[in-house]
Image (cartoon, rainbow, N blue to C red):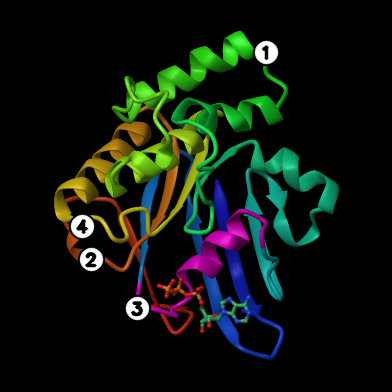
Amino acid sequence: MISFSQVYKRYPGGHEALKNLSFTIEAGEMAFITGPTGAGKSTLLKLVAAIEKPSSGSVVVSGQNIGKLRRSAVPYLRRNFGLVFQDHKLLYDRNVLENVILPLDIAGLPRAEGMKRARAALDKVKLLGLEKASPISLSGGEQQRLCVARAIVNRPTIVLADEPTGNLDAEYAGEIMEMFKSFNQVGVTLLIATHDESLITRYSSRVLHLKQGELS
Ligand SMILES: Nc1ncnc2c1ncn2[C@@H]1O[C@H](COP(=O)(O)OP(=O)(O)OP(=O)(O)O)[C@@H](O)[C@H]1O
């Protein structure tokens, strides 16, 4: 469960990016965050991922109060997360399979088990067969799907995605959304930030509308 209670986020310099946010996302829910540029969508996701801390109010994720979390506890919390963030770049000096297996190597999973899981993740995003390719040779949509495979390979309970379909045409964007829907159907909680309102009208999921840092 993700729970925000009277959350404010002020960045150094005084800009108030989020104002008095209170909402709850239940385990297994799929929800969208929309709003114009600068509305605070990325900031909200960063608070959930413990990349930023609230200035006041409480953010509780999987029973952990993010504002009170010790730095050393953050990696343990993040093991529950799959992050599809714009600044999480693919490694172009490694092939597709190596990009997906990396989080498992870091987690210390035996190689054979890691290979099995990485292939299963690539299968889910329909990239099996391109394991040996360099990410740079993939299309934009394929690279985006590779980012999704890397995010889900750890079998996260919560997936946070920031503009996962940014720069994709409607067909690729639709594919990515269908993939998220299928993860949700097996119990994964999804929180997806997007400014593309047309994409979410097809889904009956909850939508949190942000405007200048406030829920409207
Ligand atoms: N590290 C930071 N330091 C100072 N101000 C920041 C920082 N990060 C974001 N902001 C400001 O906080 C506000 C909200 O930014 P945020 O990135 O959360 O919005 P967004 O809705 O995700 O926008 P976009 O759709 O353009 O990504 C913006 O005014 C932004 O300039």
The residues tagged by marks 1 and 4 sit, at their Cα atoms, a distance apart of: 39 Å
Q: What residue is pinned by disc 3? A: 36
The residues tagged by marks 3 and 4 sit, at their Cα atoms, a distance apart of 15 Å
| SS at badge 4 | helix
- Is the CB–ligand 1 distance for label 3 below 8 Å? yes
Q: Residue, x 57% and y 56% (percent of image)?
A: 3
Residue identified by numbered label 4: 199
Identity, as a three-letter code, of the amino acid under mark 2: Glu
Residue 1 position, x and y percent, is 55, 45
Q: Nearer the viewer, mark 1 or mark 4?
A: 1
Q: CA distance from mark 3 to mark 2?
A: 10 Å
Amino acid beneath label 3: Pro
Total labels drawn:
4
Q: Which residue does the image show at 49% across and 40% down from the upper left?
A: 27
Badge 4 amino acid: Leu
Q: Nearer the viewer, residue 167 or 165?
A: 167
Q: Earlier in the sequence, mark 1 or mark 4?
A: 1
Q: 10 Å neighbourhood of mark 1: few (<14), some, or many (≥20)?
A: few
Residue annotated with mark 1:
110
Q: Considering the image in quadrants, where does the C terminus appear?
A: bottom left
Residue stretch rendered in magenta on the structure: 35-51
Judging by the rendered image, the residue that carries numbered circle 2 is 197
Residue at 63 percent of width and 43 percent of height: 62
Above/below status of 43 relative to 178: below
Answer yes or no: is residue 11 visible.
yes
Please identify the residue farthest to the top as the structure is shown.
112
Residue contact at pointers 3 and 4, CB within 8 angstroms: no
Task: Return the residue nearer the eye: 193 or 109.
Answer: 109
